[in-house]
Amino acid sequence: MAFEGLAERLQATFDKMKGRGKVSEADVKEMMREVRLALLEADVNFKVVKKFVNDVKERAVGQEVMKSLTPGQQVIKVVNEELTKLMGEEQSKIALAQKPPTVVMMVGLQGAGKTTTTGKLANFLRKKNNRKPLMAAADIYRPAAIDQLETLGKQLSMPVFSLGDQVNPVDIATGAVNQAKEEHHDYVLIDTAGRLHVDEDLMGELQRIKEAVQPDEILLVVDAMTGQDAVNVAESFNEQLDLTGIVLTKLDGDTRGGAALSVKAVTGTPIKFAGMGEKIDQLEPFHPERMASRILGMGDVLSLIEKAQTNVDEERAKELEKKMRTAELTFDDFLEQLEQVRNMGPLDELLAMIPGANKKALKNVQVDESQIGRVEAIVRSMTSHEKQQPSVINASRKRRIAKGSGTSIQDVNRLLKQFEDMKKMMKQMTNMQGKKKGKGGFQ
Ligand code: GDP
């Protein structure tokens, strides 16, 4: 989970302060000493840490905090605001050229996730903004990079411009932009070549492509897990190419957060997106404020709502809600709900966005995805009649369902019982609501 280690340390530090009615200057100093250590251990750039700690201290020992009724909470608020500032304050969106196509150069070192991110970004632009991107395969050096992009294109049913690996990348890039103009694409995403290290050849080639296609965006893809190395890479690329944005990949596996917290402050280039997994839809716009809240265990309800909005059909959700209220829920509805939740991503990732759901809390919840898989398999092994009317499921049907789903009769029994309990509970809730209306409240 992103920032897990850092979040845990900071939250432990702040838990001591939370309920305090009085906070002395010495308390703030002590706390900031711990924050400083936590940030350094998270591999945040030391200059950034120094400035951050000073800024927070200055505000925290000032009037606005000491004189408030809840100084403990106020200090955390200041830290939250300063963390947000560190990561760029406002969300920084991808450009949209006045005259299409918007040309985006994807740059970065090998293995950072450039090709994957090109596919993810194309998918994002189409899904969220209804755009029609063209991807261009200009990484002619890494074996299989072109195939990889073409496979992504097929998977997404999106076009990929390619001239093979024997053509100059500058010609590939200009060819792609010309084709995008002819075919009225609104974005061209150029997957350029990477190297193992920053070198002159690479920068020379990227500069020539830049010169030729005059991109609206140059996005650097860096691996968040490499911490300060990622920041150094970003500095070099920025000096040579004048980046417009950064995509931090593999944030899902970055427990420390050093790159995320320092790269904007060091380079002045905003983080525009974060890669949160290997799958094609695991790219998120980077919201500094929401990230800061996640780090401090305040949850990220807004991202959760957005995820729900893009993955859940509103009309169906209303229908389901009605069915729940009238306790007419069938196994078909149940299955549909499971799928919708699944589409939103791994469950532990979703839970992490809920306020207060820090690691400690999550440990007690133990999300077992295989358990959900088992439930799904059981429901899928039922006939439509059984799904609509579970009461017909007798012993021999149970045997058949268990066999078909590779589970045991006990598993089937357990699910049927849970389902019945759920329906009963809904009925009770509906009855209670009815009484409440009738009597004007219940004790
Ligand atoms: P490139 O050499 O920069 O084009 O790198 P690739 O696109 O081939 O990616 C390198 C590896 O990183 C692949 O195994 C990707 O699946 C993986 N990867 C890319 N982005 C992410 C991410 O956000 N999270 C995780 N966990 N893996 C990622």
Image: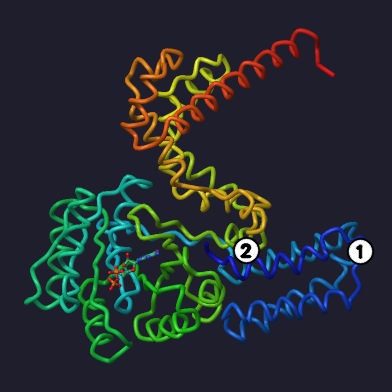
Q: What residue is at 76 percent from the left and 81 percent from the top?
A: 33
Disc 2 beta carbon < 8 A from ligand 1? no
Q: Nearer the viewer, residue 394 or 415?
A: 394
Q: Residue 328: image x %, image y %? A: 50, 15
Q: Quadrant of ligand 1?
A: bottom left
Which numbered disc flags the more N-terminal residue, 2 or 1?
1
Q: Is residue 106 above or below residue 122?
A: below
Residue 314 is marked as none
> Which residue is tagged 2?
295
Left or right: 411 in relation to 324:
left
Which quarter of the figure is the C terminus placed in? top right
Asked which secondary structure carries label 1, the reply is: loop
Q: Residue 394: name its quadrant.
A: top left
Tell me where residue 376 appears, x and y as whole percent.
Answer: 40, 35
- Closest to the camera, between mark 2 and mark 1, is 2
Q: Farthest residue in the top direction?
A: 438
Question: Dot 1 corresponds to which residue?
Answer: 67
Q: Residues within 10 Å of mark 1 (few under 14, many from 20)?
A: few
- Give the residue type that dot 2 points to: Ile
In the structure shown, which secondary structural element does the residue marked by tag 2 occupy?
helix
Above or below, 337 against 116 in this view is above
Identify the residue shown where x is 78% and y is 63%. Answer: 15
Q: Nearer the viewer, residue 218 or 18?
A: 18
- The three-letter code of the residue at mark 1 reads Lys
Identify the residue at the far bottom of this view: 200
Quadrant assignment, res 289: bottom right
- Find the distance from the CA under tag 2 to the CA under tag 1: 26 Å
